[in-house]
Amino acid sequence: MKLFILTAALSLSLNAMTAVASNPVNEKVMKTFNQVFTDARDVQWNTAAGYSEASFHSGTISVRAMIGNNGNLIRTIRYYKETGLPPNVHYKIRKKYEGKAIFGVTEVTDAAGIRYHVIIHDNRNMYQVIVNNNGNVIEATKYRRGDI
């Protein structure tokens, strides 16, 4: 009986310690997060020395947000399909890479602005293209597809 009580007490104390450690995000970070991302669901947090990072879903878009311990939004990264691109950016990519399919988009927003990392492919090649918010190509890398 003593062993049962000791085991139960140990189990409860470990669960309590886990519950306390599972929310290491400070109030300023939470305030910013709740103001900016009102429709976030399935939120998971990771913390580092100077910031916290939330991974979550907003509608059909997967999002990662980095918020400094002082509450400042540092960077957001959003993952979506081509339909999420702004029309001007979508048009310019479609025009430049005519006949090729857009596979996916990673949108990075930080102090430097907004950049779209777009994966494009055709029957033989894959292209990793970085585009600014005006639709101008900043960098493009071509790879031979290995899946065909």
Image: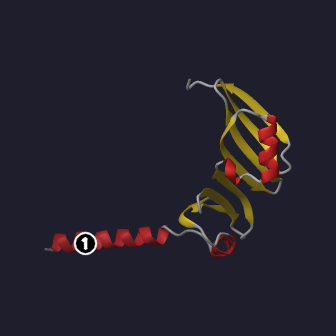
**In front: 48, or 42?**
42
Instruction: Name the image quarter holding the C terminus.
Output: top right
* Above or below for 78 versus 137: below
In which quadrant of the rendered view does residue 64 lie?
Answer: bottom right
Indicate the position of residue 75 as horizontal and vertical percent values. 72, 58
Q: Vertically, is 83 above or below 73?
A: above
Residue 2, above or below 55: below
Please, what is the three-letter code of the amino acid marked with disc 1? Ala
The residue at the point 82 percent across, 57 percent down is 111
Can residue 50 be seen here? The reply is: no
Circle 1 crowding by C-alpha within 10 Å: few under 14, some 14–19, many from 20 = few
Viewed as shown, does residue 83 lie left or right of 137? left
Q: How many marks?
A: 1
Residue behind mark 1 = 8
Q: Nearer the viewer, residue 66 or 3?
A: 66
- Counting from the top left corner in percent of width and height, residue 65 is at 66, 60
Element at label 1? helix
| Residue 15 visible in the shown view | yes
Point out the residue furthest to the left here. 1
Image quarter hosting the N terminus? bottom left
Residue positioned 75% across, 38% down in the render = 129
- The image shows residue 138 at horizontal and vertical percentages of 84, 40
In the foreground, 118 or 83? 83
